Image (spheres, rainbow, N blue to C red):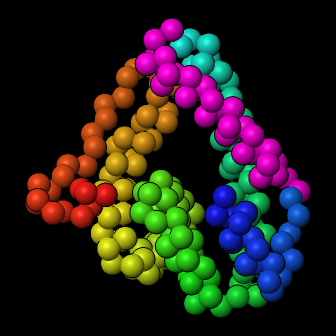
Amino acid sequence: EAEEKIFFPWIATKATIPSKEMGKCHDSLIKMMGEIKIACENIVAKKGLQCSVEIASIKEKTPSFVSEMEVHFLEEEESLCHVLRENFTEKEHDAILHQILRQGGLEIARMFLPSIMSAVKEWGTSEFYKMFVTDLPGPIRSLALNYYIPDYENVVCPSRDSPLLDKKPMLSKAKCCLIPCCWPCVI
C-alpha cells in the first residue's frame, strides 16, 4: 500500500514509472495475497482444527505466489533502481523511505522492516546493508536489530513456511528485557 500511495506517486513527480513486462501487476499479486490471507484467517477462525482444505489451498497457492513475487522484485530492482538513480538523489530517496516508515508507525515498521532488511541483506552488498541499517533512526534500528529481526527469523518465517514443512517448527520469540518501562516491550 505504501508503494502504491506514497512511493510510486513520489517517483511520478520526476519520472515515468516503467510498465510491467515480466511479472504480474500489483493488483494481481494483491489478489493472490488476499486468497492466501483468507485461507490463513479461516485456519485461525477454526483454531487450526479441520483445516485440511485451507492448508491444501495454501500449499497450492504459495509456490506460484513466491515465484511471481520473485519475478516482480527482480523486475522492480532492474527497472526502478535505474529510474531512481537517474532522477533522484540518495538523500531524496532516503527521505521518502523515512517518510513511509514514519507514516506507518511502529506497527508498520514491525510488519515490513524485517523483510525489507532481509531483502537488502540478500540482494545488496554488505556495505550497502550496513549503510541501510546505519541510516535508520536510532530507536527504529534498535527495535529492528534486537526485536523485529529475531522475531521475523524465529517466528514469522517458520510460521509462514509451516504449511510447507514436514514437521512443526520450533518458534522462539525475542525475550523482553524485563525493565518496567521498556518501550520496545510496551509497543
Q: Residue at x 37, y 23 (%)?
A: 168
Q: Position of residue 2 (x, y in %)?
A: 64, 64
Q: Residue at x 53, y 13 (%)?
A: 51
- Of all residues shown, which one is farthest toward the top? 50
Point out the image quarter for the C terminus: bottom left
Q: Nearer the viewer, residue 155 or 131?
A: 155
Q: How many marks?
A: 0
Magenta stretch containing residue 125, yes or no? no
Q: Residue at x 42, y 77 (%)?
A: 136
Residue 94 to residue 141: above or below: below
Q: Position of residue 86 (x, y in %)?
A: 76, 87
Magenta stretch containing residue 42, yes or no? yes
Point out the image quarter for the N terminus: bottom right
Q: Residue 97: which quarter of the image?
A: bottom right
Q: Is residue 98 left or right of residue 63?
A: left
Numbered range of the magenta stretch: 21-50
Q: Is residue 131 left or right of residue 7?
A: left
Q: Residue at x 63, y 29 (%)?
A: 38
Q: Is residue 73 left or right of residue 24?
A: left
Q: Position of residue 10 (x, y in %)?
A: 73, 78
Residue 108 to residue 66: above or below: below
Q: Is residue 140 left or right of residue 125?
A: left
Residue 147 to residue 165: above or below: below
Q: Residue 154: which quarter of the image?
A: top left
| Magenta stretch prevailing secondary structure | helix
Residue 60 seen anywhere in this rendered image of the structure:
yes
Q: Nearer the viewer, residue 119 or 147?
A: 147
Q: Nearer the viewer, residue 68 or 54?
A: 54
Residue 122 seen anywhere in this rendered image of the structure:
no
